[in-house]
Image (cartoon, coloured by chain):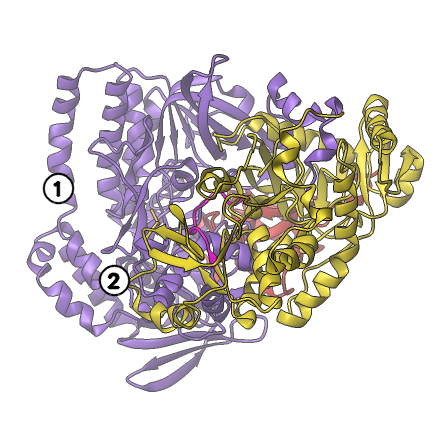
Chain colours: A yellow, B red, C purple
Amino acid sequence: MPGGVLMGAPRLRMTAMAVSRIHAESDIALVGGGLMGACLAWGLARQGLRVCVLDEGDIALRASRANFALIWVQGKGFGFPAYTAWTKAAAAAWPQLASDLKSDTGIDVGLDQPGGFTLCLSDRELQANVDTLKRLHNQPGAVAHPYEVLDHGRTRALLPAIGPDVSGAIYCPLDGHVNSLRLFRALHTAFKAGGVDYRADHVVDVIEPQAGGFLLKGNWGEIRAPKIVLAAGLGNARLAPMVGLDAPLKPSRGQIVVTEKAAPFLCYPVVTVRQTDEGGVMIGDSEEADGASLTIDHGISSVMADRAIRMFPLLADLNVVRTWSALRVMTLDGCPVYEQSRSYPGAFVTMAHSGVTLAPQHAYDLAQAIAAGGIPDEISVFGTRRFHVPACA
Amino acid sequence: MFRRAPDRIRDQVTFTFDGIPITASAGDSVAAALLAAGIRACRTTPVSGAPRGPYCMMGVCFECLVRIDGVGNRQGCLVPVREGMTVETQKGPHVLSAELVP
Amino acid sequence: MTSTTGGKAAHTVKDLADAYDVIVIGAGPAGLSAATTVSTLGARTLLVDENQTPGGQIYRSVLLAQTADRERLGEDYWKGREIAETFLRAGAQYAPATTAWSIGPANDEGGQFIGHEVGVSAGGAARLIRARQVVLATGALERPFPIPGWTLPGVMTAGAAQIALKTSGLIPEGRVVIAGTGPLLYLLAAQLIEAGATVTAVLDTTPKSNWLKALRHMPAFLTSPYGSKGLRLLRTVQRRTKVVRWISGLSAEGQGELKEVVWTAGGQEHRTPADLLLLHQGVVPNVNFSNAAGCYHVWDETQLAFRPQVDEWYETSFPGIAIAGDGAGIRGAEAAALQGKLAGVGCAARLGLIGGEDRNRHASSLKVQLTKVTRGREFLDALYRPSKAFRVPQNPETIVCRCEEISAAQIRASVSAGAIGPNQMKVFLRSGMGPCQGRLCGLTVAELIAGERGVSPDKVGYYRLRFPIKPLRLRELASLPQSDAAKVAVLADLADTHHSKAN
């Protein structure tokens, strides 16, 4: 149905195209306008770079549009302690990001970090989760994060709406959530002020390394930039090899159920159930090794709905208004990948499943590193070399 | 705002709206019964709190949402009115019934 | 149940079989005719409909209607009785007061496609029912009419008043203003006046320039059944109430409820106190089901709406899913009934119940009739093409998305901030994400974006809709069958992957 390009749009030439002419010379081109690309673009513009973002159109896979909006530390980094540290740093930097976006755009992204829960519906489930956290904390070089194991009574003291089936919970005080739609809007709104040249409907087909930079081509034309960042989510798998990079991903499909707006009943995010600041309840998420089909599986929705009701019986009469499935940007070990091409320096690939949690790291640290021209040691552990050495775990 | 054609006054059904007894004709939807009783607004929105009332009467606009027998956000134009039904203004978002919590 | 629903009406979803040859969704003229035709040809058929009795919106409550209703609503309405009665006598099963909320492919354990699975819900219980063929007959809905104040209580659609008249014999009284354009506007005005309503004024927003464009279609129209009926309605309305033409601006005013209707005509602003404002500017295909099903849609520049692309048997781009009636493009009730029959014949042929020759024989006279009843439609489309000013709000404060309370100015600002399509707009503003799922803002948002970008709505596209297309209680979702694979997809948590999944 859609799929037109912006070329030949008379009114647009007066607005967005006028901007793009001014910035025809970019210091850096980002491929991808999701949360990863938007955070980096905003951050790079703050470093004083002239940034151009080439994004897809209205219909695209867009994992950013389907996320669960958690800022989550709990349990992250098994087999990869640096990832625990990176995630903790992100959670700590979130208030700064929220505040900077507020002052840039006036948009309140609804940051709330009261700590988060994993609710368990059997003793076995609780034990399995406790064991996972113990293994995380006992691994060599472990980076600790605080957590508490709560029984039913102590869980209920904090979450009065839980049902009798909840056997207990794990609580981590560092966890939180945000309004990810407003985050997305705030970043895009900030583009204008920061002079970011954002171009929708600019699917990049080909990237050619050239002397002094890169040529990016699509059916919209071509642009040149001395540096590029691939932040195209699943699209990185196609683009990365064009500039000597590798973007190993594995299929991972998730499904989410969303309800109508309800009066506030839940003051903390739960890893599978959260109430947005607008009132809607999101229930998720499932995980299947399926990278192709986006058809909704009602059986999966049913299991998720069933568990949500057992956790919070008062949800039973709430109306479901949407279900959807999406494909995660899941790397082989689930941890982020940030890398500069060795064969074509100036080309970077960035991808992470946790685009919300890690937003401040991408907007500040990673953007700073890319602007400076290289990835420092503490971030270089997220390179793809880790996939090519024998696993130590 | 509406009156009923005399030939369409049928078996009477009594229900309450926000506690006030209202007489309707059997076969009325809740929304039609409210309009017949001169009630134009039946909810306030969860976004701004603005009052809203039935708009399309065919189940597509979700403006006639009311609380029926304790269950929130039901489409008044699709639910037939029944004797003894308790209908209430839907004030803002769906309020989850606290009594379900043990 | 009562005689109006026949002897084979399902009382609850438990009464339904696991699988049918054909499921028809919607009991207007198209759905009733499709179900009658295909069940008569031997298909095991289920018709699912949201209303209590058959008829859809055009023949709403027609089996409950009595002589007085016949006089009020006219012979065209009364014709629906025969269509509904014929359906009840045919062999199809009927599930009234039942909402269809999803459709998707059903696969066997080996992953082979074995049919469609339709989600249905009635009385707070949901089920998934399989069918080899599905006919969507979900009809039309009124085109959004975004003017300042259209969210005030006391402002309703003209169709809503007509439904209240059909279902409950409700007649507007007090100060009633009817505004807009389209054939239904004058039909409703005439019906309401005949019924004794006090109509203060009819405000006609049909642009003057439309008459010139419609002129070349005039001969076909005048010799069509629409012609004489239309002129008669116009005369009735003009004789009995004040008709104001060439309206260029319209708004509803009042604190908390409608108090006054304000309009501009001939460069002058006028206002009148009002208790009820009935708006109408034509009907458009109700595409929520076909869109969420993934059927291919096209922008119809004549009718200014998206419609699913269908072949001569009304089958969509999705094999085994047909769409008949106004849901496939606005052609009116008589055409809908004929399209329903053609879709039914098409289904029967795909099911192997009749051969190709039989199918074509059945179809040939239907197609001739279809051409006949759609004569004059070009004139109506041209004359009643709503003006841009009433499709794309000029006043920046006008609410576009009623559910999320998003204004035209917000939509326009978001286009320049990078939301180049309706789906990015959802992310930016939540427009279309409320319970009506874009039914009352989708076309406005598409046209607003198109206007800002200077492209056709065709290039902008529409919301990508999601199931359930009608709200379903969480407990209903939780009651659906849960396969082992589904449990593993959620509970693999217990196999150590849990924590790596969170954002």
The residue at which mark 1 appears reads as C371
| Same chain, labels 1 and 2 | yes
Above or below for A94 versus A281:
below
Magenta-drawn segment: A53-62
Is A60 included in the stretch rendered in magenta? yes
x%, y% of residue C162?
39, 54
x%, y% of residue A168?
87, 32
| Amino acid type, callout 1 | Thr
Q: Which mark is residue C385?
A: 2
Could one spot residue B42 in this view of the protein?
no
Q: Chain of mark 1?
A: C
Is A323 included in the stretch rendered in magenta? no
Could one spot residue C292 in this view of the protein?
yes
The residue shown at (73%, 47%) is: A378
Above or below for A15 versus B89:
below
Q: CA distance from mark 1 to mark 2?
A: 22 Å
Direction from residue C95 to residue C73 in the image, left or right: left
Which numbered disc, 1 or 2, marks the residue that appears first in the sequence? 1
Q: Chain of mark 2?
A: C
